[in-house]
Amino acid sequence: MDKPRIIVTGANGQLGKEIQVLSAKYPEFDFAFFSRVDLPIDDLENLQNFFQKVQPSFCINCAAYTAVDKAETEKEIAFLMNAESVAALAALCKQFHCKLIHISTDYVFDGSSSAPLKEDDATNPVSVYGASKLKGEDLALKKNDETIIIRTSWVYSEFGNNFVKTMIRLMNEKESINVVSDQIGSPTYAADLADVILNIINSEKFVPGIYNYSNEGKISWYDFAVAIREMISSNCKINPIPTSQYPMPAKRPHYSLLDKTKIISVYSLAIKNWKESLASCIAKIKKQES
């Protein structure tokens, strides 16, 4: 019998690359990885032919428009990639009896909460990016009832561009840097998220719906930067600043700590603390550099 096929879209992003690394541990599945160039999820005809030919059992959609600030002026592109294309992908998954795991974001919330956010808390995005991702969630669930949506936050990895790698570079270049101290949440190591996604598929217990996932702990971006500095033994001075002193085109939620109770209970997960995962990632980055 043929192995179940797992296709991964947006495979060149941080999460896609971490899934590629982990896929070797799952020889019972047949993985296929597609970048934006290989398989654009906004090219419907191509996508339809592809599904017809490949007949995947699972689709992990990591493809997204993630330029948060640029989205404020590129609204149409953001909604095309994060909403309309996701709807088309979800509909195809339904047509071909393929289970969909779609990645979403803490930016669907407005950040006005002071308690960890649950999956059924009211959404109210404050940016175009957040609004486009929320629309994608709604459409995916409407088009395909066999969809799992995982909302995540502050994603970083040894791959791609992210806060951790930017901080390491700046701390090596500058004597002092400013980092926002009044946005609260928890980081997500993409390797941990990749592990959770493959665990869900492997568990043979596919429970559709929305789930939150990040590493454990509650910090600000400033706290995150301080921990990075400690781990790379830098002498760079880090100045905590309010968001008001670091204006960006898109608003960010001030508080987006995710409550992970649901995913922990449904999938019996043990989630690592953010500091432990950060140490793992920085060790990999150092190894790459040497």
Image: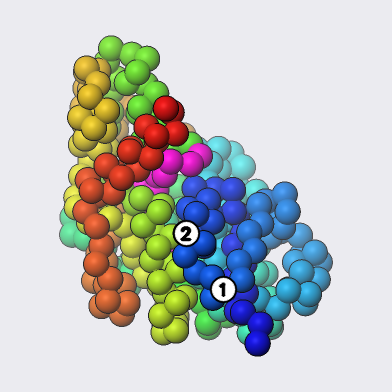
In the image, residue 44 lies at what x, y percent? 76, 65
Name the residue: 27% across, 42% down: 279
In the image, residue 59 lies at what x, y percent? 59, 70
Q: Where is mark 2, residue-wise?
A: 22
User: What is the total number of numbered labels drawn onto the structure image?
Assistant: 2
- Regarding residue 149, the answer to whether it shows in the image is no
Give, as a three-letter code, the residue at label 1: Phe
Name the residue: 66% across, 57% down: 34
Taking 115 as reference, is 80 left or right? right
Name the residue: 28% across, 49% down: 277
Report the disc number at residue 81: none
Instruction: Please tell me in which quadrant of the rendered image residue 203 appears.
Output: bottom left
Q: Which quadrant of the figure contains the C terminus? A: top left
- In 3D space, how far apart are the residues under numbered discs 1 and 2 (Cα atoms)? 12 Å
Name the residue: 60% across, 79% down: 4
Q: Which residues are magenta?
A: 150-160
Q: Where is mark 1, residue-wise?
A: 29
Give, as a three-letter code, the residue at label 2: Leu
- Regarding residue 119, the answer to whether it shows in the image is yes
Secondary structure, mark 2, is helix
- State if disc 2 and disc 1 touch (CB < 8 Å): no
Taking 278 as reference, is 16 left or right? right
Q: Which quadrant of the figure contains the N terminus? A: bottom right
The coloring applied to the image is: rainbow
Instruction: Please tell me in which quadrant of the rendered image residue 46 appears.
Output: bottom right
In the image, residue 66 lies at what x, y percent? 53, 46
Q: Who comes first in sequence, dot 1 or dot 2?
A: 2
Residue 154 within the magenta-colored segment of the rendering = yes
Identify which residue, 279 or 207, lies in the foreground: 279
